[in-house]
């Protein structure tokens, strides 16, 4: 399936990115796995997605981007859990959030971005990932994908020209 823009993540940041694109008549696909915790704070969880869908966006609810293919510094397609064919676009937006929405994953030694293998900012010393005071600001909340000055995602230290990160997935 071909689109002008594919947005990976249907939460607050993904919908905010989609709105002006849909209004401009772009063919937009939003891959939205599920409930966005930030959306719940501000509105009905699926209200913005439903509005965008009524305005012409394709919303893949309950689906998840599982891989992206990069060639010559550009994303050429993504694969999702539920679609048999790849999704193709001119531009891609990564708006998957961080840990709670699985935009970032971790084990005991590493933190990674699971769709594109984007470079991630994090402290290699795991003991510095958290503050033992539960109510204190947690250092892991500042971890996120590396971007250049234009917000393009870095993979292997190189900017992917058609992949922009927005929202919580970005490092602070």
Image (tube, grey):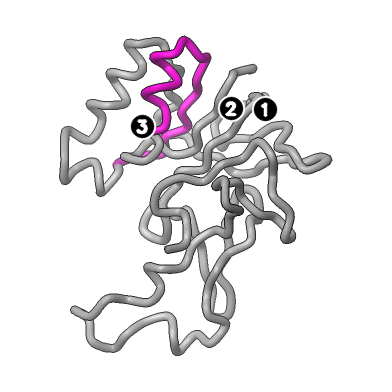
Residue under label 2, please give it. Answer: 83
Nearest to the eye among marks 2 and 1: give it.
1
Nearest to the eye among marks 3 and 1: give it.
3
Toward which corner of the image does residue 32 lie, by quadrant?
top left
Residue, x 45% and y 21% (percent of image)?
A: 21
Residue under label 1, please give it. Answer: 86
Q: Is residue 3 above or below residue 139?
A: above
| Residue 25 shown in magenta | yes
| Residue 107 shown in magenta | no
Which comes sooner in the sequence, label 3 or label 1? 3
Q: CA distance from mark 2 to mark 3?
A: 21 Å
Q: Which mark is residue 15?
A: 3
Residue, x 72% and y 60% (percent of image)?
A: 157
Q: Secondary structure at mark 1?
A: loop
Residue 139 image offset from top left, x and y in percent:
38, 77
Question: Mark 1 Cα within 10 Å, few/some/many (few <14, many 20+)?
Answer: some
**73 displayed left or right of 62:** right
């Amino acid at each position: 399936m071909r689109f002008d823009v594919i947005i990976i993540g249907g939460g607050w940041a993904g919908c905010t990115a989609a709105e002006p694109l849909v209004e401009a008549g772009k063919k937009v696909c939003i891959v939205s796995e599920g409930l966005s915790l930030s959306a719940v704070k501000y509105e009905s969880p699926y209200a913005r997605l439903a509005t965008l869908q009524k305005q012409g966006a394709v919303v893949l609810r309950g689906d998840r981007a599982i891989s992206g293919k990069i060639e010559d510094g550009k994303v050429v397609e993504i694969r999702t859990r539920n679609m048999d064919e790849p999704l193709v676009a001119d531009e891609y937006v990564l708006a998957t959030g961080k840990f709670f929405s699985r935009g970032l994953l971790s084990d005991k030694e590493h933190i990674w971005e699971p769709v594109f293998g984007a470079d991630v900012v994090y402290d290699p010393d795991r003991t510095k990932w958290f503050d033992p005071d539960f109510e204190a600001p947690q250092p892991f909340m500042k971890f996120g994908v590396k971007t250049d000055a234009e917000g393009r995602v870095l993979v292997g230290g190189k900017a992917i020209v058609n992949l922009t990160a927005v929202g919580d997935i970005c490092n602070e």
